[in-house]
Image: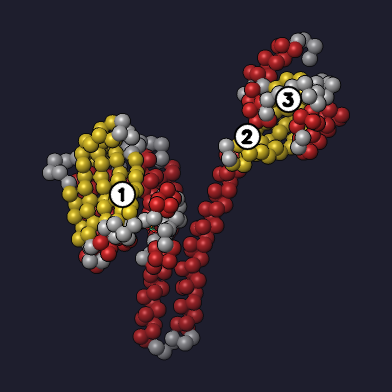
Amino acid sequence: MDFLNDTALAEFVDAMPLPAAVVGADERIAITNQAFDQIMGVGLAGRHYITALRQPALIDAIAQVMSNGGTAYATYLTRSNGGDASYDLHVGQAGRAALITLTDRTDAENAGRMRTDFIANVSHELRTPLTALMGFIETLRGAARNDPAARDRFLGTMEQEAGRMTRLVDELMTLSRLEENQRRRPTDRVDLGDVLRVVSQALMPIAQAADVDLTIDAPDLPVTVLGDAAQLQQVFTNLIENAIKYGAQGKKVVVTIAPHSLISRLRARGTTITVQDFGDGIAPHHIPRLTERFYRVDDHRSREVGGTGLGLAIVKHIVNRHRGRLAVTSELGQGTIVTVTLPKD
Ligand SMILES: Nc1ncnc2c1ncn2[C@@H]1O[C@H](COP(=O)(O)OP(=O)(O)OP(=O)(O)O)[C@@H](O)[C@H]1O
Ligand SMILES: [Mg+2]
């Protein structure tokens, strides 16, 4: 590298898109760029690489290149912003010196972990109804073979469990389709009054069965937003269904459309839809987690009413795609208000 003086070399290292450092022939760190300093700490230049870097894996990789040439790799683990961070470290020979570069692997590793968690959750959710089904099949073959009453009861439960699995698979497919078109903003003009009328009609039987009075308070004029009608129906189906399922003791569910209200968080006028129930409410520490996949407040109770914990995850995805906001406020013993705000068309 005779054609480069030290200043020019430092400029090249600074211009690199990766965190980078040069270890000189004297085994001292000659140059670091800013990105490198941010990760490894400032003030390493001038120090011997062994005392400066300390992690044995990094030191071994550099030592190998300094004595044998060629290239070497290592993994650098650290903590940043309170989380674990992971980098691929590459050491390449540059004459009698060595060039060190770092590649951030943290996001890829987190994505991998999320995928593993997700598969574990799905398997667990499917395993529970499957185990129940297997048990009932065995009983029907054996003890309940000649007992028509028991057989009917078991078949009813089996139907429920199969229904739960179907729902789970449907919801997972909805989520994966949503992820595909997350970035494409919907372009149809949709009347929210229409959406809510369709949804409330479909849910009326469930409301009646739960002895809940479901009312929709919408203005007479159309309230249009740019949206995807089927997806918005899904949003309000999930929210109203939750209000009926988990708020039934309150005996009523009120849905309100407030057009063109000022939304300070959006810094714009928009349309606010609230779904309010008067049931048990949700404890504050659960609220931030409700939109996580498979998150249920009361695992047992939610399971009993057939919940998979995906409903609000789907709602969140759809609202995001519409560039809207989702907010949950709740008071124990008083009830829950879920607010969806959609930007004005
Ligand atoms: N209105 C509400 N009142 C009290 N708890 C609620 C209310 N809405 C949701 N929850 C709680 O939040 C959890 C998550 O709701 P979510 O709709 O995501 O899942 P789910 O209803 O369990 O299943 P799914 O909607 O997929 O059938 C529920 O299990 C329930 O415990
Ligand atoms: Mg739900």
Say if residue 108 shows up in the picture: no
Q: Does 167 sit above or below residue 42?
A: below
Q: Residue at x 34, y 48 (%)?
A: 328
Q: What is the spatial separation of the Cα atoms under label 2 and label 3, in whole angstroms? A: 20 Å
The three-letter code of the residue at mark 2 reads Asp
The three-letter code of the residue at mark 3 reads Leu
Upstream in the sequence, badge 2 or badge 3? 3
The picture places residue 335, in percent across and down from the top left corner, at 29, 56
The residue indicated by pointer 3 is 44
Query: In the image, which disc is placed on residue 338?
Result: 1
Task: Describe residue 94's horizontal placement relative to residue 246 as left or right.
Answer: right
| Residue 248 falls in image quadrant | bottom left
The three-letter code of the residue at mark 1 reads Val
Residues at marks 2 and 1 touching, judged by CB atoms closer than 8 Å: no
Query: In the image, which disc is placed on residue 146?
Result: none
Image depth: mark 2 or mark 3 in front: 3
Rate crowding at label 1 as few (under 14), some (14 to 19) or many (20 or more) other CA atoms within 10 Å. Answer: some
Q: Residue at x 36, y 75 (%)?
A: 156
Upstream in the sequence, badge 1 or badge 3? 3
Image depth: mark 1 or mark 3 in front: 3
Task: Describe residue 129's horizontal placement relative to residue 320 as left or right.
Answer: right
List the single residue furthest toward the right. 67
Splitting the image into four quadrants, where does ligand 1 fall? bottom left
The picture places residue 148, in percent across and down from the top left corner, at 37, 86
Q: What is the spatial separation of the Cα atoms under label 1 and label 3, in whole angstroms? A: 52 Å
The residue indicated by pointer 2 is 104
Q: What is the spatial separation of the Cα atoms under label 2 and label 1, in whole angstroms? A: 38 Å
Q: Does 195 sit above or below residue 169?
A: above
Q: Is mark 1 within 8 Å of ligand 1?
A: yes
Rate crowding at label 3 as few (under 14), some (14 to 19) or many (20 or more) other CA atoms within 10 Å. Answer: many
Task: Describe residue 36's horizontal placement relative to residue 248 as left or right.
Answer: right
